Amino acid sequence: MALLSRCFYTCKTACFHHICVTQSSGDRKDSFEQETASRRERSPAVQFAPLEMTFRRRLLLGVGSASLVAVGANFLGVTSFLLGLSPETSRNLKLDVVYPIGGYNRCIDTNEGFEFIYPATWVGDQRLLYRAAERKELERSLDPPSLNTSRRLSNVNEPVVAFGPPGTTGELNVSVIVSPVSLDFKIEAFGGPNEVGETIVRTITGSGKRPEVKGTLVKSNLREDSVRNIAYYELEFRVESPSFRRHNVAVCCVRNGRLFTLNAQAPESAWPEVKLDFQRIAQSFSLTS
């Protein structure tokens, strides 16, 4: 009897297990068939919706990254265009040192303490850069300074910076010369802009010693910076001889024992094209320290 009971229990358990397995297999089969039917009923758009969202996020991220690169590299003038929408604000932030704004870049010389704008298509004079690098190298050298001062004196009136169109002869350019003067030197002591302009023209033409060279003062103007107490003498003059005819715009000012002279020159034939550029260059020239 006990053995029969155990056999019955074993048979009953096996049958119950068979029923459960059969039922479970049937449920999985029904579930699989229902899921397959559901997939068939769903459209491709619904099936690929998660992939679409992922692709859209990646696309937006890629477009955003590409936009940042384009703005940072000024690709096709994107950055210059955006900055040009608010030129005064952009110039006040000195962003035109890196990106052209309105067709102009800004030169800032922190060593001498001046700045001005120039056409964005112009390039710097590489010779001046090389000489500046040589001077810095000599300053860092451990060797004692040379006793030969003739070379140093010969470069007193050498421009600190110069810019001009690439591939030209140098007749069209703008440069800045910084010359040492006494601390009590005042440009106003030589008169107003007109008197100083006439004196400069006479000096260039040799005060009559070179009759073949003639100079004419076209215009003079006084621009004052009341905050820094600086007077800017803006001059426009022509110089001509049998071999050349040039048009010049110059700005002169004095600060802390240094005479600053910005000079922009062009062949007379090119003056109508660069007149507006020269006027903007002259008006932008200012001392920063």
Image (cartoon, rainbow, N blue to C red):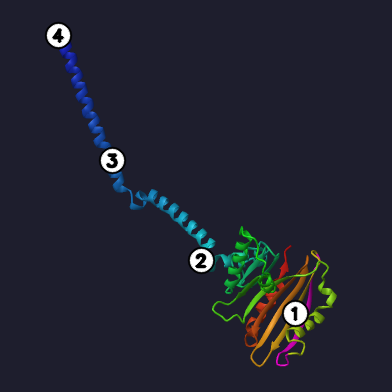
The CA distance from mark 3 to mark 2 is 55 Å
The CA distance from mark 1 to mark 3 is 92 Å
Name the residue carrying label 2. 75
Residue 31 percent location from the top left of the image: 28, 37
Q: Mark 1 falls on what kind of element?
A: strand
Name the residue carrying label 4. 3
Residues at badges 1 and 3 in contact (C-beta under 8 Å)?
Answer: no
Amino acid at pointer 3: Gln
Residue 126 percent location from the top left of the image: 57, 71
Q: Mark 4 falls on what kind of element?
A: helix
Residue 218 in view in this figure: no
Residue 218 percent location from the top left of the image: 75, 85
Residues at badges 1 and 4 in contact (C-beta under 8 Å)?
Answer: no
Of the two numbered discs 3 and 4 on the same chain, state the one appearing first in sequence.
4
Q: Quadrant of residue 289?
A: bottom right
Q: Which mark lies nearer to you, 1 or 3?
A: 1
Residue 132 in view in this figure: yes
Range drawn in magenta = 210-226
The CA distance from mark 3 to mark 4 is 46 Å
Residues at badges 2 and 4 in contact (C-beta under 8 Å)?
Answer: no
Amino acid at pointer 2: Phe
Q: Which of 135/262 is in front?
A: 135
- Taking the magenta stretch, the answer to whether it contains residue 237 is no
Q: Which of 262/185 is in front?
A: 185
Residue at image x 43%, y 53%? 58
Q: Is residue 25 left or right of residue 281?
A: left
Question: For the view shown, which residue lies furthest in the top direction?
Answer: 1
Name the residue carrying label 1. 235
Of the two numbered discs 3 and 2 on the same chain, state the one appearing first in sequence.
3
Of the two numbered discs 1 and 4 on the same chain, state the one appearing first in sequence.
4
Count residues near mark 1 (Cα–Cα under 10 Å), then give few for <14, some for 14-19, many for 20+.
many
